[in-house]
Amino acid sequence: MTNTYTETWFIDCKHYGNAVPPDALSNAAAWANAERPAVLLCMVSGFLSNGAKNWVDDYRRNNNPPFRIRTWERPQL
């Protein structure tokens, strides 16, 4: 017996020469909050700034979003 599981992911890709700032992630979060995917994935070609990582943690804690937030930085691509 095989089970099938389907979920919607929203993927936001960022290509910055330096660290990705927190404000670069807020539009994707607002979009995901309106559309309600299962996962919001923020893929960055470099790395997230410490401020962006803190923003993600704060967003999860303060907003309790109906979706999971995942981040993939350069080493994970």
Image: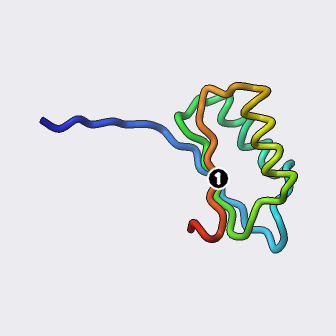
Q: Quadrant of the N terminus?
A: top left
Q: Is residue 25 left or right of residue 66?
A: right
**Residue 20, placed above or below residue 54:** below
Q: Position of residue 53 (x, y in %)?
A: 78, 50
Q: Residue furthest left?
A: 1
Helix, strand or loop at label 1? It is: strand
Residue drawn at point x = 37 percent, y = 37 percent:
6
- Counting the numbered discs, the total is 1
Residue drawn at point x = 81 percent, y = 74 percent:
17
Q: Nearer the viewer, residue 7 or 55?
A: 55
Q: Position of residue 54 (x, y in %)?
A: 82, 46
Q: Position of residue 9 (x, y in %)?
A: 52, 43
Q: Position of residue 55 (x, y in %)?
A: 82, 43
What type is the residue that disc 1 sits on?
Thr
| Quadrant of the image occupied by residue 63 | top right
Q: Nearer the viewer, residue 48 or 25?
A: 48
Q: Label 1 belongs to which residue? A: 71
Q: Is residue 29 left or right of residue 40?
A: right
**Residue 77, placed above or below residue 39:** below
The structure's colour scheme is rainbow
**Residue 65, placed above or below residue 18:** above
Q: Is residue 46 left or right of residue 67?
A: right
Q: Quadrant of the C terminus?
A: bottom right
Residue drawn at point x = 69 percent, y = 36 percent:
31
